[in-house]
Structures are given as C-alpha cells and as structure tokens.
Amino acid sequence: MQTKPEPAVVGDDLIEMSELEVHYELRGGTLSRLLGVGAGTVKAVDGVNVTLRRGEVLGVVGESGSGKTTLGRALLGLAKSTRGTITYRKPRAGGEHPEQVVSKMSARELRELRTDLQMVFQDPHAALNPSMSIETAVGHPLKIHGIASGEELRKRVAAALERVGLSPAEQFMRKYPSDLSGGQKQRAVIARAIILDPEVLVADEPVSMLDASVRAKILQLMLDLKADLGLTYVYITHDLATAKFFCDRIAIMYLGRIVEIGPTDEIFADPKHPYTKALLKAIPEPDPHKVVPRDLPRGEIPDAASPPLGCSFHPRCPEAVAECGWESRDLRNLLEEHWTRQDPSVYESEQGLVGDLGVLDKPQKRVTIGKGADSARVRQLLDRARAENPSEPLWRGVDEVRETEDGVEVVFHKGYDPLLRPSGGVEVACVLYPEPVTPEPARPEDDRHGS
C-alpha cells in the first residue's frame, strides 16, 4: 500500500453532531402488537457528539453492529434521528456559513441537501441499477435535480467518468454494470456521487467488497478527488489498516457510542480504550514469520436492544475494574462458562442448586440465586467458580456474596457510564482515563434496573 499523504489543511467546523441518537423500535409478536406492548428498542446510535471539520477525512471504525453505518446514513437524513441535532454549515459566497439542521429537515429540504452531501455505498454491484447504462446511472442526479439535460448532461457525465479513471469515457458510457469489473463499478458509483459537486462524501466501506489488488487504487482515487475538488470525507470502515492510510482523525464506535476519537497517528501510537487496543491487535501482519499477540476480546457484541450497564464493553474487556458496571447478566455468563468445563453429572447437580437462570436476565446490581436451604452449597459453587479463574474481571465488580434465608445474594459494585474525556491528544470514554476514576452520571435507564 502506498504511503499515507501529508494531512490536508483542515478548515472550519462543517458538520456538528450533538447528542445524536437513532433508535429503532422492535416489533414483537402478534399478541404484543395487539396489547400495545413494545418489544424493546435498538439503540443504533446512542448519544454521539462529534464535529466534522472542512477538508478532513474522519474515519468511523468499529465491528459490525457498532452503529457506524447508521451514523453515516443519519448525516444524510437517510436514517431519522430520535434525539439530538445534526448541524450543517453550508459555505456561501462572502465567507458566510449559515446553519442548517439536517435532523429537522423536511423531505423536500433533504432532497436539496443531496447536492451538498453524497454517499458512496459499500456494494458497488447493488448500488448501480442493472437496467441503466453507465451514462444514465451517473447522469441521473443531474436529471433529478434539474441541473442539466441533453448534450450538457452528456458532457458532464463524460467529465465525471474521466475524472474517476474510466477513460475513454465514450467507451464506458454505453456499457451496463454487468460489463464492468468490481473496481470499475465502484469508480462509476464515485462518479455519480461527485457529479453534483458535493461538499461532503460519506463513504460506507467503499473498498471492503473489492479485490485487494484494487483497494489501494480506489483509496488513492478518493484522495486525489479530495485534493482536486476540496472534498470532506466521512470514511466508515471496520478495517483500521485502511483507516491509517486514509484518515486524518479516527472515531472508534462500539454499540452505538464513540469510545475513543483523535488524530490517526496518536490512535495508532498510543491507543487508550481497551476496545481500540483490541482492534489494533486484530490487524493482519503481512510478515508470515512475525508472531503477533492476538489478545482479542472474548464473546460477541452484546444486544443493542439491551446493552450492558455502565461501560458497554466491560463484559469483554480484559482491563475491566470494579467501576465498569458489572451486573446480573455477567454472573449468568460466568456460570454458563463454568458449566462448559464440567462433566454432565456435575452440571446437572449444580444447575439444580442454582435453579432457573432467567432471574439473572433482568439487569440488576443485587440478585439472589438458589434457595435458602441450599445457600451454603450455592456459595461453595460460586467459590469453586472463582477458584477456577481468580483473574476473572467480574470478581473485581462483586462487593458482597452472602447467604440469606432466600438463597445467596450477590451485590455488585456501583458502576459508571463513562463519557468522552480528554486524555493526551485524544478523547476516550473509559473509567481508566483519566486516573483516578471519577464518578460519571449513569444513563437514565440504568436507574430502572436497581442499585
């Protein structure tokens, strides 16, 4: 891959997202809908604050399900925001930058916004209509907005195709998407995005579905277009390796929230958040003879409809401490993991002592398991599980385990939902930064789960 170019000169604030939320209501079964009972809410974007500056490339990085694509779609008004604002400061002649609140625009206003903000989608094969010629597909935005028609439209399409490297343009204009390779299709998609002379391009995984041999070429094309046209990019990706090459700043997303944001060089040189460290360790090492430690996070991304209390990453975090937000569901995971290491007879005996683990599914900071008559044996079971793996982070968050007349009560330490705070040259949402740990306000829904 080519060497990353020198960072461009970054200008004034262009787009500001403030407390942005995009939530989706889940639909339950027929009975739930008849009774008017909701099935929960997926918090795809959950309180994001970030500012995009004119002329920069902001990378939004995270695993699948982290909310990065929804964030990009919300910027263009393709995903309706539930709360918060997206403010676009459109440049005007004379140096004025009047504010436009994207999150409150009507459908007509959003349509006009498309001339300033455009998107490059992940799948170039699906982004182009197979029944449209390349000329028709690339020129369609000009026709929709009434900007050009006839010979003028044809000239502008040819110029856009030439600019993205589909040359000679006459040869490609008559072709259909099925006649092009994956890289050529993505170039056509980019041509369609820039033909309206936009200010901002939201690029959603623009190279993830392309062969490795053409990825660097497409990224270099996008950098050349940025220099030639003065573009500002939001680059959405799960691949930190390409983000290092392409981005000026990187925002790391996890379960709908930004957990770390800062200059690319600093993120790579000194990552703060444990999730950022895990993503960096997952980058493939091209040297087959070099052994790289892969201390990847355990488990899977939690359910966005019911995120963990406190820090959402704490169930998977190797550096978690008492204040991270441990709760009843973490205890269930620990018991189930313990039982995977036991003989079936031991599992049946211990499971009978504990009873139905469903009581642990409701997020709680204080929970009772087992029955009073078996409390001593249940306590011994927990002691055995702890002895098996004394370094298990969950135990750092347990304040008390005591036998009662109803069973064994487990009390978890009060956790915090960390906000983004300055640490060095970045901002990080982690109770470990800055030290010592300072109390953070809990999310409103945390209070409903008990203390």
Image: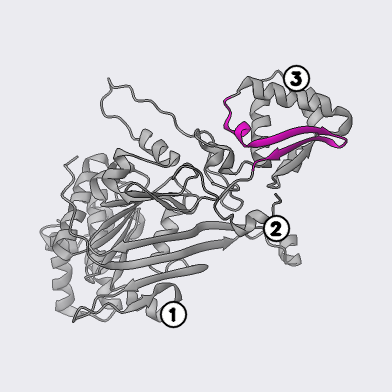
Local secondary structure at mark 2: loop
Q: Answer yes or no: do the residues labelled 1 and 3 have beta carbons within 8 Å?
A: no
Q: Residue at (41%, 63%) from the top-left corner?
A: 73
On the image, numbered disc 3 is attached to which residue? 346
Q: Which residue is mark 2?
A: 29
Q: Earlier in the sequence, mark 1 or mark 3?
A: 1
Residue position for label 1: 106
- Report the side of 184 relative to 371 (left or right): left
The quadrant of the rendering that contains the N terminus is top left
Answer whether residue 282 is magenta in the image: no
N-terminal of the pair, mark 3 or mark 2, is 2
Residue interval drawn in magenta = 391-413
Q: Secondary structure at mark 3?
A: helix
Q: Nearer the viewer, residue 301 or 132?
A: 301
Numbered disc total: 3
Query: Cβ–Cβ below 8 Å for labels 1 and 2?
Result: no
